[in-house]
Every structure is written in structure tokens, then in C-alpha cells.
Image: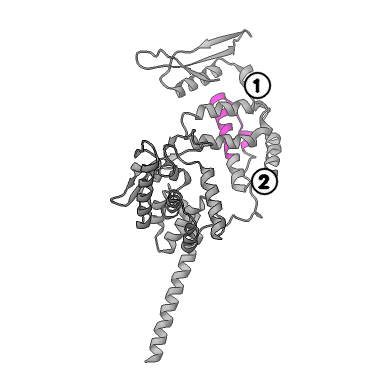
Amino acid sequence: MPVYKDKHPTKDGRCWFFRTRYKKLDGTHDQYHSKKYMTKREAQEAEAEFLIKSQDEANVSALSFKQLIDLFIENRSTIVKDTTMYNYKNKKVYLEPLYNVKLKNFNIDVYERWRRYIITCNLSTRYKNDIYKFLKSLLNYASDWYGFNFVHVYRKMHNFNNPNEMPKEMQFFTYDEFQKFLSVEEDIKFRCAWQLLYYCGLRIGELKGITWKDIDFENRKVTINKQITQQSCRSKWQFAPPKTAKSNRVLPLTKVLVNDLIKLKESDKEILFGFKDSFFVIGDVAPQVSSTITARKNRNCELAGVKQIRIHDFRHSCASLLIYKGANINTVSQFLGHSKIEETLNTYTHLYKNALTDITSLIDDMNEEQNNDFLTL
């Protein structure tokens, strides 16, 4: 049930309206054309209220999960980030067994059958629970907008849990491994990409979003204030805000990286027609696609004889390097742009434990040296 935008707004700017068919109390069908609203969301909310108030029980009671998902995604399209929409559409696939189920027929037996299906899927427990949360969001939407009541089902629903599942080991490059990896990279653009990922702890979308105007060569800093959302080709991309408010940050650049960026910019000026500072550092007039970056990473790991890590593991590598060099948890959290310090603690607690062990080893070494000095007196 989409809403529409009128080409002729009212004097105060209202242009959104909805048009829908509904069943009247006498059993006949009619079409309703609403007044105009200021925003798309207002029109969507008004449409939902109209359907409920008009007692369109036949229409609402026949609502299937497939229809609900489409309505939910349409509603959220104007109020969530593109990355969130991308995740919705990925999770939607795992709700296919529920597509033809009418919401009025959704009960604990239906839920349990779906749950058994998800258990058979080759997914991590964490991702299964992400899908479960998506399902609950859909049920909440159906309750808020269409008057359904799932309290009797909620009480018996619960998270997925697999006590035998081994946690995935966090992969990262040590400084020496990274230098070995970097040594096989002859392309200056990719050399800059790997250093930005490793030394700045960037997310892949943040890396792709950097333009030349974001590089402050004089003060050796880079501004992170946007990202590139998912793209399948170089012609389809758009800017989006960083993942969280604290992901907006200004990071220092190493001397070696600055020198490589200077070389890269001079090269781009020579080979890219109409070069502008709005061009992408890792790309040109358009950002580089993730698959190309991943393929290059795989090739370099093989050539350098180092372990294969994910692109996101460069971010973990940066955190590991900072912690190993004595950075406190607040510094690491700010550097990575985490929204909460708890996120940093939960992700890197084991690295801090290793750092504490290193500190005690240093103290033991100093004590041993002091004892040796005493014995020589």
C-alpha cells in the first residue's frame, strides 16, 4: 500500500497522499483518496490509521507475512540508513517459510517450525539472533500499525543458543606480517588503501568514502565523515553518514602514508581527466568496489606468504597494534569510532589481557635484573 507524491503541492508545501481500496460496512468496496500531508511518513501513518478506523477487517486479517515485510521495508525506507535497508533485504530471505502465513494464524507452532528451519541453516548463532530480532521488529510493526496482538506468542519465543559453538577466532596482522603483506604491493593506490585500513582502523565503507578534500597534508590528518554504502558496480553508489555519530572523526596519518598519498595524488592528476579534489582516493570519479579490494587482498596474502584475513580484520589489526603499544581503552574506542566504550571492551578484552601479561613479564624482567645487580655487589 504505497503513498504518492503530488506534483502540485499545497501553498504550505504538503504533497504526500495515499489512495487505497477498502471494504465498507455494507460489504461493498470503494476507493479512498486522502488529503495531502507534509511528509511521506505522515501519509503512511494516516493510511494505516484509516485502514484500522474504517474497520477493513477483511483486508487486514488477510495480511500475509510477505505483504507485511514489504510494508515494513517501504515504511523504513525513509527513516533508516541504506546499510540498514541492505541488511533487511538480506534477512528477508530467511523468512521465506513464513511468506504465505496469514498474520492472524501466526502462533507458537508456526514460530517453532520456522525456528527449526533456521537451526538447519549454516549460520552463526549471532546472525540467527539478528534474524530473530528482525522477525520481532516485524511483529511489533504489525501490532502498532494494524492492531495485531502477539503477546501469547512473545512469551514463548526466545533467542537462539548453541553452547557447543566455538567462537570465531579474531584474525589480525602483526606489524611484521603487515609489512610483509605491504612489500608485495606495487600499485601506489592499493598501498595507500592497505595503510589507511591498517594504521587508521577504517571500515571498508569509510575507506571507499574518502575523497581528496578529506586529506589534510599539512597537518597529516584524514577526516572521516561519510561512507559508501553497498554497491554491486562502480555506477551504483551513494554517500551515507558513518555508522554512528562517534564514527565522525579526524585521524592522524603516518609520515610514510602521507608521502605515498602525495605520490598517488600527483599520479591521479596526470592520468585522470578533469581531476578534482572531490575524486575518490581509493578510486577515481567513483569509488572502488569492495570485491576488487578483496580480490587484491587475497592475491597479496598469497604472494607474501601470510595468512588470509578479512578486510574488516585490518581494523582489528589496528586495534591490536594500538593496544600492544599501550593505548588505553578510551583512546582505542575514539580511534575506531565506536559508539560506546563497552563495544571496544567486549571486542578487545582478550587483547588487553595479553597486554597485561606482557606488562607483568616486563616487571618480572626488571625484578630479575635488580636481583642480579644485588648479587654482583
- Disc 2 marks a residue whose amino acid type is Asn
Label 1 CA crowd tier, 10 Å (few <14, some 14–19, many 20+) = some
Q: CA distance from mark 1 to mark 2?
A: 33 Å
**Which residue range is magenta in the image?**
132-154
Look at the image and tell me in which quarter the C terminus lies: bottom left
The residue carrying mark 2 is 122
* Marking on residue 62: 1
- Residue at point 35%, 43% (across, down): 214
Say which quarter of the image contains residue 117.
top right
Q: Is 344 left or right of 167, judged from the image as shown?
A: left
Local SS, label 1: loop
Foreground pick, 117 / 253: 253
Say which quarter of the image contains residue 163.
bottom right
- Residue at point 64%, 25% (across, down): 64
Q: Nearer the viewer, mark 1 or mark 2?
A: 2
Looking at the image, is 318 positioned above or below residue 223?
A: below
Evaluate whether residue 317 shows in this view.
Answer: yes
Foreground pick, 78 / 54: 78
- Residue at point 39%, 60% (across, down): 327
